[in-house]
Image (cartoon, rainbow, N blue to C red):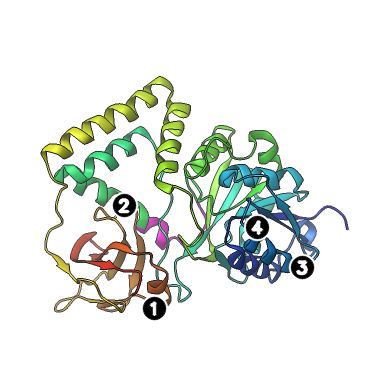
């Protein structure tokens, strides 16, 4: 066998059942390579030091799948880099195990890379549920302005409204796109890149154990003069938040500090410290900016049915679902009628915690009704 057209690197840690599923999904894909011939695929599974039970499950993979086992948990970026080191493809993809590719996904992701030299990497449209109702949020570019808005927004009502409206406007543009569009950051859960880009800018910074590794990589790719392209025709079901994490809060804090120090120097490092101190001071004097007219749903055992009675907006409605009252980030679903039904498959995968949902007038981006509830493990 000659050089494969595409190498797909799957990073897995204690989620072997998902890894088996995504490999099966990849093997079902067909795509066209240069010259119109049928493309060839190499699959590399990086076992990021899973426990023995999950390591045994990975032995069920077909013999043509390359399995690498790390000597310790290297984090997502570090493990991905191990796969990049042995990947032989003309193009290289990296993806989480907790997803399922829909037919034609690889074809759609590769098409811009084959036809436009200026495109350095592509990313798919992520759905949160098998029914394809809720779309995952776009990735944010973590600028210093974004840091300030996300920290102070929940404490200052006017700033909160400004930021949420700005974020929602960008998210709706992302969700409603039907053609490929350039973006600042592609979600690291699934990226397909040129071999030349990987050689020029390198893989992920292994200093990020979790989080910010994709934003860091995206900055380096853009600085090298390449475009990052979101391709909505490439559809993927992302069973988000199902892959196990190690100390996610601690990892996020460490990665945030590293990112701002790396890309903004002394100004970024000091900025993070100052913002955190000011936020702590403000929070001690003032409660979080409250949501108005929130309808509490208590502790429902079944997926809530969210309905807007009375006059319906002519421009249609959007439903948002989020674990945060700021709705940044949030998953979104365009509604045809006045009711949003959360799919049972999505409901069952939601981890215990507080959740918020709201219906939004698409024409004005004005929230029309908001709900909140607590989900327990037994639900």
Say if mark 2 contacts mark 3, CB within 8 Å: no
* Residue situated in front as seen by the camera: 59 or 340: 59
Going from N to C along the chain, the mark reached first, 4 or 3, is 3
Q: Which residue is mark 2?
A: 328
Going from N to C along the chain, the mark reached first, 2 or 3, is 3
Label 2 vs label 3, nearer the camera: 3
Q: Which residue is mark 4?
A: 111
Q: CA distance from mark 3 to mark 1?
A: 32 Å
What residue is at 31 percent from the left and 60 percent from the top? 322
| Residue 234, quarter of the rendered image | bottom right
In the structure shown, which secondary structural element does the residue marked by tag 4 occupy?
helix
Say if mark 4 contacts mark 2, CB within 8 Å: no
**Is 81 left, or right, of 223 in this rendering?**
right
Going from N to C along the chain, the mark reached first, 4 or 2, is 4
In the structure shown, which secondary structural element does the residue marked by tag 2 occupy?
loop
Label 2 vs label 1, nearer the camera: 1
Q: CA distance from mark 4 to mark 3?
A: 28 Å
Q: Which residue is mark 3?
A: 62
- The answer to if 71 sits in the magenta stretch is no
The percent position of residue 243, horizontal first and vertical second, equals 51, 59
* Residue situated in front as seen by the camera: 41 or 256: 256
* Residue situated in front as seen by the camera: 45 or 265: 45
What residue is at 38 percent from the left and 77 percent from the top? 343
The magenta span reads: 172-181
Say if mark 2 contacts mark 1, CB within 8 Å: no
Label 4 vs label 3, nearer the camera: 3
Q: CA distance from mark 4 to mark 2?
A: 32 Å
Q: CA distance from mark 4 to mark 1?
A: 35 Å
Say if mark 3 contacts mark 1, CB within 8 Å: no
Q: Which residue is mark 1?
A: 344
Q: CA distance from mark 2 to mark 1?
A: 23 Å
What residue is at 42 percent from the left and 64 percent from the top? 135
């Amino acid at each position: 066998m000659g050089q494969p057209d595409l190498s797909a690197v799957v990073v897995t840690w204690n989620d072997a059942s998902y890894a088996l599923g995504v490999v099966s999904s990849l093997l079902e894909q067909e795509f066209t390579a240069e010259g119109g011939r049928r493309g060839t695929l190499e699959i590399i599974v990086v076992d990021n030091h899973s426990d023995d039970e999950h390591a045994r499950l990975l032995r069920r993979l077909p013999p043509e799948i390359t399995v690498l086992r790390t000597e310790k948990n290297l984090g997502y970026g570090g493990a991905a880099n191990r796969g990049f080191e042995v990947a032989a493809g003309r193009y290289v993809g990296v993806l989480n195990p907790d997803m399922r590719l829909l037919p034609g996904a690889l074809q759609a992701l590769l098409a811009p890379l084959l036809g436009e030299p200026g495109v350095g990497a592509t990313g798919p449209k992520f759905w949160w549920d098998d029914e394809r109702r809720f779309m995952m949020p776009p990735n944010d570019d973590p600028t210093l302005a974004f840091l300030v808005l996300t920290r102070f927004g929940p404490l200052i009502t006017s700033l909160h409204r400004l930021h949420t409206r700005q974020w929602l406007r960008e998210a709706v543009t992302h969700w409603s796109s039907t053609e490929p569009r350039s973006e600042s950051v592609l979600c690291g859960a699934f990226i397909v890149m040129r071999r030349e880009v990987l050689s020029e800018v390198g893989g992920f910074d292994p200093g990020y154990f979790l989080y910010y590794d994709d934003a860091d990589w995206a900055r380096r790719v853009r600085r090298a003069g390449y475009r990052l392209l979101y391709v909505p025709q490439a559809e993927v079901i992302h069973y988000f938040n199902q892959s196990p994490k190690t100390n996610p809060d601690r990892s996020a804090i460490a990665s945030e500090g590293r990112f701002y120090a790396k890309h903004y120097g002394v100004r970024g490092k000091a900025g993070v410290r100052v913002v955190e101190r000011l936020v702590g001071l403000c929070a001690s004097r003032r409660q979080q900016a409250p949501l108005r007219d929130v309808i509490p749903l208590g502790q429902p055992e079944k997926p809530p049915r969210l309905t807007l009675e009375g006059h319906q907006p002519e421009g249609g409605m959007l439903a948002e679902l989020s674990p945060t009252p700021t709705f940044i980030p949030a998953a979104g679903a365009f509604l045809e009628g006045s009711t949003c039904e959360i799919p049972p498959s999505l409901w069952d995968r939601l981890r215990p915690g507080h959740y918020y949902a709201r219906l939004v007038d698409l024409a004005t981006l004005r929230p029309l009704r908001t709900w909140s509830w607590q989900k327990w493990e037994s639900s």
